[in-house]
Amino acid sequence: MTLDREPPDILIALLDLLHERLGPDFSEYKSTTILRRVERRMRLHGYEHVERYLERLEDDIAEVENLYHDLLIGVTRFFRDTAAFDVLAREVIPALIEDGAVSHELRLWVPACATGQEAYSIAILFAEALGSSGTGRSGVKLFATDVHCGSLAEASEGWYRGDALEGMDRERIERFFIPEAGGYRVTPELREMISFAEHNLLADPPFPRIDLISCRNLLIYIKPEGQRRILPLLHSSLVEDGFLFLGPSESLGPLESEFAIVNRRWKLYRKLRDVGLGPAVQPQAAPRISP
């Protein structure tokens, strides 16, 4: 079963139904990504024809929500690409702490945070660095956002199955996690470093005055025109000399000249300057924040 030969109006009908029932607009997502997830749901329920599956969606809000969940949830785990986080800890975080200790509270942003593993990984690195520097964690605030409320609820809860921590240093587990109910819960101190909030990177205004944005492995699912909207927003969110952390298969596109390369292999960049943006990408209001 494959959907790549289906007429475009079938895909449009699917996207319209998702938008009408649940709100988010998936039209900026690559069609190949959407079709793979739809095919998965069709196989799960034994559908051979997408028209029949569309009829199911029209009558079954639970299946609409399940498809929505599948479209949004990618691969996420603690310290994904360990070498990339090693570079972040070695080349970026010390510079931010040194600058922040002198001038301002450090503000970090993890868009599309899913169930929170990446956000907590970054918080752990800052907690470790701040602990060794004696600066303290009160000078760091991490905003972790997503469009999927269910994922945000899991992330905010901070509880993970034991296998989610496989490969993590035992010392880190003992310092930042508490054994609980067959799994582990993040410590209150780590949880307090992060504010989780509902936010759609393709529709909502960006967070201002950010020192580090980690937006890894989202752009690969977005059409080029959507990427051209998102990247200027990320650039405008960063303070001058702020850092941008992308996934290994992602690029800056036309904004390459606006960033210095910190690490080419792991797509770490530093903003060179503030430049004016057009009205289409200017922030209109502050995003909603919840602890």
Image (cartoon, rainbow, N blue to C red):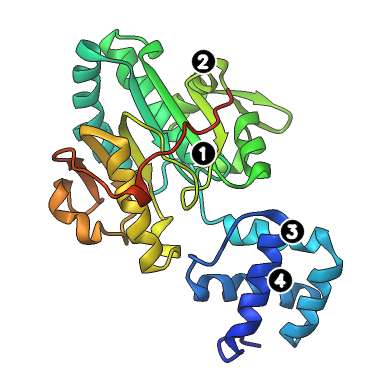
- Residue that mark 3 sits on: 21
| Label number found at residue 64 | none
Between tags 2 and 1, which lies in front? 1
Q: Are marks 3 and 4 in contact (CB under 8 Å)?
A: no
| Label number found at residue 41 | 4
Compare marks 2 and 3 and give the one earlier in the sequence: 3
Identify the secondary structure beneath mark 2.
helix
Between tags 4 and 2, which lies in front? 4
Mark 1–mark 3 distance (CA, rounded to whole Å): 21 Å
Residue 154 place in picture, x, y as percent: 65, 37
Between tags 4 and 1, which lies in front? 1
Q: Residue at x 31, y 59 (%)?
A: 250
Mark 3–mark 4 distance (CA, rounded to whole Å): 18 Å
Between tags 2 and 3, which lies in front? 3
Q: Callout 2 environment at 10 Å: few (<14), some (14 to 19), or many (20+)? A: few
Q: Are marks 4 and 1 in contact (CB under 8 Å)?
A: no
Q: Are marks 1 and 3 in contact (CB under 8 Å)?
A: no
Q: Callout 3 environment at 10 Å: few (<14), some (14 to 19), or many (20+)? A: few
Residue 132 place in picture, x, y as percent: 29, 14
Mark 4–mark 1 distance (CA, rounded to whole Å): 26 Å
- Residue that mark 1 sits on: 145
Compare marks 4 and 1 and give the one earlier in the sequence: 4
Compare marks 4 and 2 and give the one earlier in the sequence: 4
